[in-house]
Image (cartoon, rainbow, N blue to C red):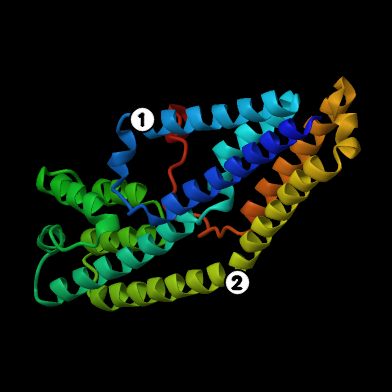
């Protein structure tokens, strides 16, 4: 490789690294939007795809390694989601805390002699943001005369966390069996949800070390590759042939598997849902 190509390769790899960093920071700084915003036209996705393809094509042209170009393009596309902030965990914590706050609202309203339908309708304008739309649809279903059990089941499916399932089960039991200690039960559920949210925050703090270690490993490996391209190109000469490209592809696949594995290790599962949707019973089973 000529010095000009080495400098250009260094610039391309540096640009790819800056792209990953800027996309990760933009994802961290971008405010959380309602779920329906995801249905907007994918202009951002098209722009991201064009940037990833440009980075991959530049690396391919400058190094002569098509596999390196494909790996850079794939890294620019999936890197921010694997190495960036864990939005999934943040949404989990926000969802649990929102269910806890909404449960406390219901408890306080029902303690003031409000019925279940009236209490749910009263919480629509003041419900926490993560559950406001599901609560609004729940109130609309109850207002339209849909059975309480079906309405609460649909609400639990929309919120999609185990705490909401417990609250929906408690409210269903109170509506169908006229439970007298519903306030105490809702208070206990809200307290348990608060404890679960605090536990999720503690777990996230301990598992953040895994994500930090992953970022350090990736940065050190890319930096070493750039230094070898600049100061020891003969060491990387075996990658110029077909066999070298196959070996590079195998190494890239191993790296991708390791990154996905490390990312999954740093995630936390809330556990199985009590009211998880299941297969509908067959007519023979119903008989």
Residue found at x 45% / y 75%? 198
Residue found at x 32% / y 69%? 100
Please say if 152 is above or below 64: below
Q: Quadrant of the N terminus?
A: top right
Q: Residues within 10 Å of mark 1 (few under 14, many from 20)?
A: few
Q: Tell which of 243 and 5 is nearer to you.
A: 5
Does label 1 or label 2 sit earlier along the sequence?
1
Give the tally of numbered discs: 2
Q: Tell which of 120 and 90 is nearer to you.
A: 90
Please say if 184 is above or below 33: below
Quick check: can you spot residue 287?
no
Q: Tell which of 27 and 112 is nearer to you.
A: 27
Residue found at x 20% / y 70%? 105
Q: Which residue is mark 2?
A: 206
CB under 8 Å between discs 1 and 2? no
For numbered disc 1, what is the local secondary structure? helix
Which picture quadrant has residue 122? bottom left
* Residue 43: numbered disc: 1
Rounded to the nearest whole Å, what is the CA distance between mark 1 and mark 2? 36 Å
Q: Residues within 10 Å of mark 2 (few under 14, many from 20)?
A: few
Q: Position of residue 48 (x, y in %)?
A: 47, 34
Furthest residue toward top:
242
State left or right for residue 264 relative to residue 237. left
């Amino acid at each position: 490789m000529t010095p000009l190509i080495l400098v250009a390769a260094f610039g391309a790899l540096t640009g790819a690294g800056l792209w990953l960093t800027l996309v990760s920071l933009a994802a961290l700084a971008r405010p959380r939007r309602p779920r329906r915003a995801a249905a907007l036209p994918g202009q951002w996705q098209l722009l991201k795809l064009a940037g990833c393809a440009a980075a991959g094509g530049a690396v391919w042209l400058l190094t002569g390694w098509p596999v390196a170009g494909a790996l850079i393009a794939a890294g620019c596309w999936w890197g921010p989601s694997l190495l960036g902030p864990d939005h999934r965990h943040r949404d989990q914590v926000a969802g649990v805390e929102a269910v806890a706050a909404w449960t406390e609202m219901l408890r306080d309203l029902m303690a003031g002699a409000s019925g279940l339908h009236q209490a749910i309708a009263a919480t629509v304008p003041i419900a926490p943001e993560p559950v406001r739309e599901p609560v609004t649809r729940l109130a609309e279903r109850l207002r339209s005369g849909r059975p309480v059990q079906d309405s609460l089941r649909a609400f639990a499916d929309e919120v999609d966390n185990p705490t909401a399932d417990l609250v929906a089960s408690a409210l269903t039991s109170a509506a169908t069996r006229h439970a007298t200690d519903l306030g105490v039960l809702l208070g206990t559920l809200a307290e348990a949800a608060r404890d679960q949210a605090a536990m999720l925050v503690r777990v996230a703090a301990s598992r953040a070390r895994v994500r930090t270690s992953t970022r350090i490993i990736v940065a050190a490996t890319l930096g070493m590759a750039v230094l070898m391209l600049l100061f020891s190109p003969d060491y990387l000469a075996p990658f110029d042939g077909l066999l070298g490209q196959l070996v590079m592809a195998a190494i890239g696949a191993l790296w991708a598997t390791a990154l996905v594995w490390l990312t999954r290790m740093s995630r936390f599962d809330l556990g199985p849902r009590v009211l998880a949707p299941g297969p509908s019973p067959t007519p023979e089973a119903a008989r």
